[in-house]
Amino acid sequence: MQLLHTILIMLLVVSGTRITAQFIPLPLPLLQILVGALLAVPVFGLHVRLEPELFLLLFIPPLLFVDGWRMPKGQFRQLRTPILLLAFALVFFTILGAGYFIHWLLPQVPLAACFALAAVLSPTDAVAVSAIAHGRLPATLNNLLQGEALMNDASGLVAFKFAVTAVLTGVFSIGDASLQFMLVAVGGLLVGVVLSYLLGRLRAWMIARGWEDPASHVLLLLLLPFAAYVTAEHLGLSGILSAVAAGMMQSRLDLLPKQTTTRLLNRSVWTLLEFTFNGLIFLLLGLQLPDIVTAALANHEDVWAFLGWALLCVVSIYVVMMLLRFVWVYGYWRCSGAWRRLRGRPTRFAGQSRMALSAVLTLGGVRGAVTLAGVMSLPLLLNSGEAFPERDLLILIAAGVILLSLLVAAMTLPRILPLLPQDNVALHEQALNRHRSRILEAAIRYLESEDERAADAESAVASAEIKAKLMSEYRELLGRTGTTEEVREKVREMDRLEYRLRLQALRTQRLELYRMRKDDELDDDLLSEILRDLDIAEARLNKG
């Protein structure tokens, strides 16, 4: 019963902080962490024991799955070079640079443990950045940060596991680790793709037999990220990358026919889960803070001196990690611009300040849930039976870096973003209208062909009137005032004809949209926006 009360209180707090954030000038993640810390003080006595493995399994797979699902694939392909460099090369650059610095700062901690802390601090949290930016982040930069966060969760945690293993065993081989990393990453991606493909085939088989109940399809999709994660982890592969790959694959398989109601329900369910899980993650971080601080202070008599020294370590490590990130990002912009000019191609973000871009991407490297879950999973004992060196201190530093990164981003990003040109809304609308025009033309061509097929039918005149929408109000009036069964039957026949034509016209538009996406004539964000409008129109038609 106590667990149930705790869960209900946390859900109520998550909802309440979302409402309160409209009146308090604090980013929602920081507000939720603050409220969680307040609830954990003895006066309120809300205590949640965090099991890192359960935390990873419950929260991380669905959130990464939905991020992979919503990530525009066209943008991901266009930005693949900077995304992969940020998600993999920068992670290892950070592990080396920050790892040696942490070892210099904390000489009592083994070098492998310092690498483990640097690795677990490498994953970024694009959701927190979006909450801080309040939608003002340019779309390309937002996609870049999302793509990086999708991939560096896996690279950072896999590197963290290798470093922890080195601490436990005292043995480490960079050659073996590199080969194993590739196998774990590629294997995880394959598991996610295969499971997502098999689920798509299963759903298509169900639809072909008339099993179109949206609830069952949505439930299967809810289970997919957990299945991908657990299967990959059971095989010794990357469960995180498996969940990401399943989401990215499912975004294509979601274009199944006769799935209008399922897609609408699916969007609503995943939006709810994403909001709830993200809120719970930051709330749990706040709830853990008192325990983290208490455990770190347990063996120190001079509390204030230790806290001051720990704060100095947190600030120093954060500054070094931000400097490493800034050097990498700024160096990439310089090299990328020079390479594009050498090839005679326009530079990406032409005319924009490299310093402002680098600052936004640097400060946008906020740490979050994955870092917390990873560092809490540090083992208590080494293989020799000794205590893990400075475990409580490492957890305290990681929690401090998470909070500091959120606080700095909240104070600086709103001041830097105005220096960047915002998205061209008019250009987006032009592209959207252009694609809508093409699918409408496809629907018109269908209606014209339907008119030709019905040229000799008795309902040819009524069909033309319906398609032209010239007599709809009169038919409605006739249906309300008709006194004979013959008149009412005629109205019902015309309504059935109108329904069939409208439904087929909508489905023709959707098929044309799928063809355009298959031929890479439009990106996923435009497809999603237009497809949502078509689904809503069909739902309204079916309801009517």
Image: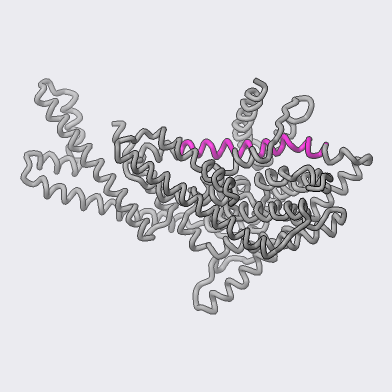
Residue that appears at 78% across and 35% down? 290
Q: Position of residue 324 (x, y in %)?
A: 72, 62
Secondary structure of the magenta portion, mostly?
helix
Residue 50 appears in the figure: yes
Figure quadrant of the C terminus? top left
Q: Is residue 465 left or right of residue 140?
A: left
Q: Position of residue 417 (x, y in %)?
A: 61, 55
Range shown magenta? 267-294
Q: Is residue 271 magenta?
A: yes
Residue 70 appears in the figure: no
Residue that appears at 71% across and 60% down? 94
- Give the camera-side residue of 239 and 252: 239
Vertical side of 219 occupied by 482: above or below = above
Vertical side of 417 occupied by 482: above or below = above
Q: Position of residue 219 (x, y in %)?
A: 45, 35
Q: Is residue 346 magenta?
A: no
- Coloration mode: one colour
Check the image and name the residue furthest to the right.
Answer: 301
Q: Position of residue 220 (x, y in %)?
A: 45, 38
- Give the camera-side residue of 165 and 139: 165
Displayed quadrant of residue 147? bottom right
Check the image and name the residue furthest to the front.
Answer: 384
- Give the camera-side residue of 347 and 283: 283
Q: Is residue 151 left or right of residue 536?
A: right
